[in-house]
Structures are given as structure tokens and as C-alpha cells.
Image (cartoon, rainbow, N blue to C red):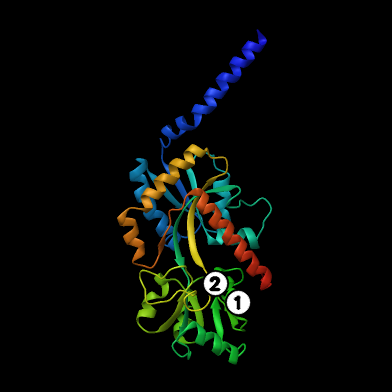
Amino acid sequence: MHKVLLKLTIFVVACVAMHWGPAKAQAFPNKPIRIIVATVAGSGPDIATRQAAIRLAAILKQPVVVENRPGANGMLAANDVAKAASDGYTLLDANIGNALNDILRPTPGAARIEQELVPITDITASPLILVVHTSVPANSLKELLDLARTKPGGLNYASGGPGSLIQLTGERIKLAAKVNITEVPYKSFGADIADMLAGHVQVGFGVWGNIGSHIRAGKLKALGVASSQRLSAAPDIPTLGEAGMPDIYATGWNGIFAPAGTPPAVLQVLSRAFMAALATPEFRDFFLRDGVEIGGKTPEQFSAFIRNEKTQYAKVIRDANIKLD
């Protein structure tokens, strides 16, 4: 009798477990979804998330609220979302800064993307563009590197400070080309533009949304874009690979994450909804004109992308002996 009851109990539990995932997916969402953005209002990731949220709300037929929680290079927002209920109603918009945090600032107990936070999809990516001031006698990447070899330490480049995407990209190019170009650190991304335009720094990196107008006006010369393909907004700029330096990819990306433990069925609903939102002509047109690449990876593809990002930048950090202040 006890064996019969035990078998019956196991059968009932198995049936419940089998149907729980689809049932949860059908019920989700039935209340507003909140997305916490790790950057300030008006930043690139914030704008992209808000544009995606508008389309997401229409697709899921539930309000999608976007809140900003900047601070500690994205760690504050990541920690908040990691502590939230694993039900799909609190999500994180993280970015490349969060991935670099996991390498450079392995704080005990801090939430890490791909561990305490699981990926859903990427939203947008803005490739870095290598530029020089018009006074620099170089019109191609090859000419710039040749010039650097004749004047070791004589050229300088503007970076976003220790551990920034720009510093890691600049040092990676220096290592690959075996050149010595002096780093001039700035406190934040874009803070160097005024000095670049004035010629106080000779080499720099930026995204099309920040420096495209200066390139078009002839105030800066673009030598290459750190992407696998040319920008639709500026098809005349070669990729760094085309310019002679393959495998140098550097993008400021952002994407959506959920607390670890969120049911797979809920993650699937969110993944499909975000992909549909990013595929709308309105979303694509809004960003493609500014040289921004549109995301839409599956959770598995996004996870693999993040692992590759961490691997490549960890190598640069080791090889260039980069340390935080």
C-alpha cells in the first residue's frame, strides 16, 4: 500500500513539474515589468532600453517601466536586480562596463553577469571608431602606425581611464602593432572630444553618435571602425580588419539580464518578445541612422558573446599589465 502511494505521489509531482513551465509561460506577464538601467538617463544604453521598452509593452500587453540606477560602474544596478525575485518582472540593462567589472573588480559578493544574472538578449552595440586630429600626417591606419614607429612615444591617444573600453582597445592595438603611443586618460567617455578637436590629443576613439558630425565636418579623420562590418551610417570608413589589423573588435554594448533562477519558460517569453521589439522597423530606423548595431541574440548566443568578451579583455589586461588606481 505504501509503495502504491509513493508511486502515485511521484507521478503527481512529475506531472506538476512537467506542466509548470508552460503554465507559467502562459500566465507571464500579468503585471508591469521593471527594467533597471545601470547608466544615467539620456545615456546610449538608457535611450536604447527605453526605445525597446515601448515596443516590448505593446508586444506583452503590460506596462514596462524603466528606472535608472547608476553608480559603482554598474555594480549597484546589478546587485539590486540579482536580489530581486526570480520571476521575470525585474530585469537589468547591463553593458560592457559590467563585463569589465567582473574581470577588473572581482568584488566578493557582487553580482556578476552570466552567473548571478542570466542573459536574455543584447539590445544595441556602438563600435569604436579610431580617429586622428587633422594635424596628424596620417590618412590610414598603416600610415598612423608607421608614424608611431618613427616617433616612439611621440604620439598620444585619449582614453577613458584605467580599465575603460577605450584604454583596453588602445593598448590592444599597441600590443598587436608593437608601437609606443602615450596614453592620456580622461575621467569619462566623451570627455576628450573638446581636446581632440583642439589638437591637444592626437589620436582617439569614439562612437558615431558622439563624433560622426566632427568626422563629416572634416575636423577629425576616421581611420577605421572596430567592427566586423562597416557602419551603415558611414560606409566609407573601413573596418580595422580592412585597414590591416584583423580581429580587433570593440563595441560599447548593452543587453538585458534576469536574476539567476528565473524559470526557463519565462526567459523564453522575454527573449522572444525582446527579439520582436528589436526587429520592428521603428526601432531599427531609430538607431541604424546613428551607426548603432541592433542586437537580438538568443540567450545562448548572448552568453557565448559575453564569455568571448571577457576572455579577450582579460588577455589584454594581462598582456598590457593594466591595473586600476
Give the tally of numbered discs. 2
- Residue 312 appears in which quarter of the rendering? bottom right
Residue sitting at the far top: 1
- Determine the residue positioned at 35% across, 79% down: 216
Determine whether 116 is above or below 209 in the image: above
The front one of 169 and 246 is 246
Tag of residue 166 = 2
108 left or right of 116 in image: right
Q: Secondary structure at mark 1?
A: helix
Q: Secondary structure at mark 2?
A: helix
| Amino acid bearing label 1 | Ala
Q: Earlier in the sequence, mark 2 or mark 1?
A: 2
The answer to whether mark 2 and mark 1 are in CB contact below 8 A is no
Of the two numbered discs 2 and 1 in the rendering, the one whose residue sits closer to the viewer: 1
Residue 289: image location, x then y, percent: 33, 66
Residue 119: image location, x then y, percent: 52, 49
Determine whether 106 is above or below 28 in the image: below
Determine whether 11 is above or below 44 in the image: above
296 left or right of 109 in image: left
Residue 71: image location, x then y, percent: 55, 59
Q: Residues within 10 Å of mark 1 (few under 14, many from 20)?
A: few
The front one of 68 and 144 is 144
Tag of residue 176 = 1
Quadrant showing the N terminus: top right
Residue 320: image location, x then y, percent: 66, 73
Whether residue 50 is visible: yes
Whether residue 89 is visible: no
Tag of residue 223 = none
| Amino acid bearing label 2 | Ile
